Amino acid sequence: MGKIKIVLATSNQGKVREIKKILDIKGIKILSLADFSERIRITENGRTFKENAVKKARAAQKKFGLAAIADDSGLCVDALHKKPGVRSARFARPPVTSEKLCKKLLRVMKDIPDKKRTAFFVCAVAVAGPGGRIKIIEGKVKGTIIRQLKGTRGFGYDSVFVPRGYEKTFARMPIAQKNKISHRGIAFRRTREYLSSILREK
Ligand code: IMP
């Protein structure tokens, strides 16, 4: 039996590499948007991570006629009514850099006391089956926002986020350690289990 092809609806090559590593399942071949010459344009204007992930997965599934997987993620700060949330990537003025995002967050949170600086990262994954069936899977990691940038690895808000139970920011952890506890790691390991269970049913 040939391998089942699934399109990963992202053109971020860093994400593609990480996700391919986790979804390394016998019987499944993971493709990305880079494997197709046709392009899809998706505006991430949903109100939730799930909405955005579903929108991206559906668009790729329709365009290429294959099962598709998409994710959407971001940071939610409790004291900011869960902001920046779905706007995490656009929280600073363009051209956006990780440093700008972290500095803006620290500025907005400067009067928030240590005890109230709790936050969490969320990653929503949507799997769109060839028949239009949608499965949504979520991963979450809780932590706190510290008061200055620490560490140089990672991206986005990694330099200001310390996961619960740890003393280092994500930006000071080796990528393998971050993946073990991160929202994306959790969500994609669950996706792996889901895909494996579908294969077993066949
Ligand atoms: P997207 O899922 O690529 O749309 O990510 C949205 C934004 O959320 C990113 O640009 C980052 O600013 C933030 N973000 C998501 N995941 C992480 C993470 O693991 N570390 C730091 N920032 C993240």
Image (cartoon, rainbow, N blue to C red):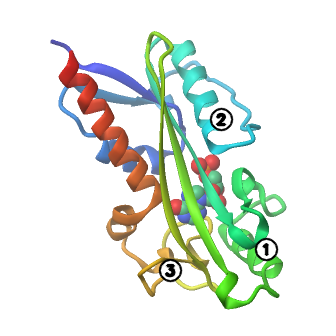
Inter-mark Cα distance, 1 to 3: 17 Å
Q: Considering the numbered disc 2 on the image, is that residue within a helix, a strand or a loop? A: helix
Q: Are marks 2 and 1 in contact (CB under 8 Å)?
A: no
Q: Is residue 93 left or right of residue 76?
A: right
Crowding near the residue tagged with mark 1, few <14, some 14–19, many ≥20 C-alpha atoms within 10 Å? some
Measured along the vertical axis of the image, is residue 101 above or below residue 115?
Answer: above
Percent coordinates x, y for residue 32 in the rendering: 45, 31
Residue 20: give x, y in percent of width and height: 34, 42
Residue 118 or residue 121, whichever sits in front: 118
The image shows residue 94, relative to residue 102, as above or below, that is above
Amino acid carrying mark 2 in the image = Glu
| 35 to 84, vertically: above or below | above
> Please, what secondary structure does the residue beneath circle 1 have?
helix
The amino acid type of the residue labelled 1 equals: Lys
Would residue 109 be found to the left or right of residue 142 on screen?
right
Going from N to C along the chain, the mark reached first, 2 or 1, is 2
Is the N terminus in the top left, top right, bottom left or bottom right quadrant? top left
Q: Residue at x 61, y 79 (%)?
A: 160
Type of amino acid under label 3: Thr
| Residue occupying image coordinates x 31% and y 47% | 22
Density class for disc 2 (Cα within 10 Å; few <14, some 14-19, many ≥20) is some
Q: Which residue in the structure is indicated by mark 2?
A: 51
In three-dimensional space, the C-alpha distance between marks 2 and 1, rounded to whole angstroms, equals 26 Å
Which residue is label 3 attached to? Answer: 169
The span from disc 3 to disc 2 (Cα, nearest Å) is 29 Å
Q: Nearer the viewer, mark 3 or mark 2?
A: 2
